[in-house]
Structures are given as C-alpha cells and as structure tokens.
Amino acid sequence: MDLIEKIHNKTEYRKHKKVVLAYSGGLDTSILLTLLQDLGLQVATVTVDLGQKEYREQGMAEARQKALKLGAIDATVIDGKEEFAQDYVTPAVHANCLYQGTYPCSTALGRPLIAKYLVQEAEKTGAGAVVHGSTGKGNDYLRFEVSVKALAPQLEVLAPVRDWQLNREEELEYAVEKGIPVPIKKTGYSVDANLWGRSVCGGSIEIEDQEVPTDALDWVKPLDATPDAAQVLTLTFDAGTLAGAELDGTKMLHSGAALIEALNRVVGNHGIGIIDQIEDRVIGLKSREYYECPAALAVIAAHADLEKTCLPKELNQLKMTMDQKFAEYAYGALWHSPVMDATRAFMDATQANVNGWVKLKLFKGGMHVIARKAPDGLYQRVHATYGRNSTFDQRQSAGFGALYALSTTTARHPHWMTQKNQEATVHATA
Ligand code: ARG
C-alpha cells in the first residue's frame, strides 16, 4: 500500500488548517512536509541551526529554499547557536551535566530550544499545532511534547512518524514519487547533532556486543589517525562559564558557540569524545547509544575539576547530587518545568567563585587534567603541605580524632566503655 493511501483516512490531523513543522531539510522531515499537504494542511517550516555541521557546509538558505519548493507557506530559518550556547549549554556546564555519569545530554538540551522556536512560529502564523519527526520510541517526542505544553498549552503536538507508524521502505518510495531528493550514501544511522554533540543511533549500533564501525564517526578521529604528540588545552572559566581557551599556550581566538565548535575539532582530533553505552531511556527501555561529544567532555572535565578547588566540601558533596538531578531532568524532558527552574537556581547560587583555569593533556584518545589554578580558590598549600612551615597546627587534630572515632568504636564494641569504667572503679576502690 502506498503512503498516500495509508494516511488518507488519518483524518484526525485535519482539524488543524495550519501547522508548524520542525524541518531539518533531510529526507524524513521533507516527506512529512509533503505528506501533511497531501492531507490538506498548510505547513510552515522552522529550521534551527544549533551548530549542525551540515548547515555549516550547505547553509541554512538551502533548507529554506527546499522547504519553499516543497510547498511550505512560510519557511523560517533561525540561527540558534549563540542562544543554545548561552542559555542551554552554559547552565549544563555549571551542572556538569552528564546523564548516567556519561552523556552530556546534547540532543536532550537542543530539543527544548527548538520547541521554543516552534511555539514562536505557531503564534506568529496562527497555527494550531506543531509537528516534529521523532518516533514514539526514543525520548525526543517527550521533549517536544513537554516543552511545547509548558510554553503554550493550547498548541497540539503532532508526531506523524509515531502516529502513522511510517517505515523506511514506504518513505523512500514516496520520496521518489514526489521528487524529494534521496541521499545516495545511506549508512542506516539516525543522527542528531548540535554544538554540544553528535548522537548516532540505529543500524549496526543496535548490536551491543560488536564494536561500532568507524563509519559512524564524524567528529572524532579514529585512534590510528590521531597525532603522535600530545597537546595541552587550557580552559578558562569566569563564574563557572567558559571564557577562553589556549592550545599549547596559544590563545584560541573564538568565543561563544564558535569556541565550542573549535574545541570539538581540537579535542576530537586526538580521538577523544566517544561515548558508547547502554542507556536507560525515559520509559525505562534500554538502548545502545553512540555519541561524539569532544568539547562537552573536555569542558565538563575541566569545570568539575575547578569546582573542587573553588567550592567548600559540603557544597561539593551536595552539588554532586544536584548535578545528577539536573542531568535527569534535562534528559527527562523537563527543561521547561518548575523543578528545573529550582535546580538551575541552585546551580546559579554556586558559580560566583568558580574562576580560574584548568589544563588538560590530550593524547591518543585519553584526556587528563594535569594542572589548575583558581585565584580565589580554597586550596591553601601552606595549610595542606606535609613539608616544614605548615600554617595548620596538626596537634589540634588529636581531640577531633578521638571524638570522630567514638561513633564507630561504640557501634563495634558497645560494652567496651562500660567494662573500662568498671575496671577503673574497681582499681580506685581497691
Ligand atoms: N538517546 C539520546 C537522547 O535521548 C540521543 C537521541 C538521538 N536522536 C536521534 N535522532 N539520533 O538524548
């Protein structure tokens, strides 16, 4: 059965005369663009550049032209890179955001911003619904759904790939029929990319007991092609926010989104940035995921190190828990939810003193912090030194040691104290 026939009786979308489609310019969303028109809807598209390499190479204008050619009533292109870097990536750095300890949430952070632009466009064009191309299996449909509802509850969120259970074969047939260009080179991967990382899933990545082939890589060099000499990357932070970088002592002349893009190249060049994991999706489904996030891993490693220098012990401890919650909420589609506002307020209250630099050594797939300096950090060598002239009088620790051991001693030997006291009394009266 061909696709037009299949969706013909899917009338529930028809109540919306006009919809806004999140349009990447790729095959899937191009198919959606024409399919929705086949149903009789007017479609306005929104294409958002959050730092996808494809847009750097082809330009956003091309996506716009393509949308208009395929019949969009309006095709808006938005350069969201700086907003993404400032309002999404920066808070994630403050929170050392790593879902399950490993994934910097790159895709997860991009969706709520795309949702925001979709809502803006819907309000501008008077559309009743927004449409995205995510399936009902991953997490992305939840991020669109929750974000749009948080911002504009009157808008409906349509997910045709999920609702109509579209499959690859019928999509390709339809594309040919409609004259939608089909990419020649097909790896079978589903890719989502932005400044903060590149997520690759599907295809051979689903086979969890096999190494992912190098054709899945785009940002990270395979180890046999990386430089034979190490490089030292110095990252500088101002109130927890990345403020500059030096490579082997030479200042990198970028800032904002461009600096993150440059870091992806520098760090990825050393074979660093791959994350290969079995991941718990929001609904609890486990999936094998593959990511390239060179800049994110480097910036978070440096930021987390600097925080240890700058924050007092109890705050560092609490922050580890809060960092984890932040990542769970970011991953779990709750970016625009009140719990995230509160978590972000906590993060904001912790960053004022996180100033200084951290040096990372990059070599053959490995990255290590090798030095750091925080001008108003809390590390005081004169206190901590084991050498002569320490300013900290360690004799103070004797009483503390005895008291600190009390709880453990009592628990392990409940009667020991009483026995000792009795013996002492016997001695005294003898
Ligand atoms: N599992 C990741 C997440 O939920 C990545 C999803 C990537 N999406 C894609 N279409 N490749 O954030």
Image (cartoon, rainbow, N blue to C red):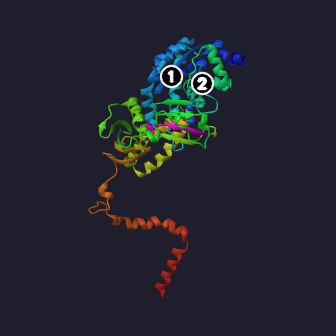
Q: Which residue is more in the foreground, 373 or 315?
A: 373
Q: Which residue is more in the foreground, 77 or 148?
A: 77
Q: Circle 1 sits in a helix, a strand or a loop, which is it? A: helix
Q: Which of marks 1 and 2 is in front?
A: 2
Q: Which residue is more in the foreground, 25 or 120?
A: 25
> Where does the image place residue 245, in percent across and percent down from the top left?
34, 37
- Say whether residue 342 is left or right of residue 30: left
Type of amino acid at the residue the image marks with label 2: Gly
Q: Who's the residue at 51% across and 69% down the image? A: 409
Circle 1 residue: 117
Q: Who's the residue at 41% across and 38% down the image? A: 267
Taking the magenta stretch, the answer to whether it contains residue 354 is no
Circle 2 residue: 133
Q: Which of marks 1 and 2 is nearer the N terminus?
A: 1
> Where does the image place residue 212, in percent across and percent down from the top left?
56, 39
148 to 76, vertically: above or below: below
Q: How far apart are marks 1 and 2 (CA)?
A: 15 Å
Tag 1 and tag 2, C-beta contact below 8 Å: no
Quadrant location of the N terminus? top right
- The verdict on label 2 being within 8 Å of ligand 1 is no
Q: Circle 2 sits in a helix, a strand or a loop, which is it? A: loop
> Where does the image place residue 259, in percent across and percent down from the top left?
38, 32
> Where does the image place residue 161, in percent across and percent down from the top left?
64, 25
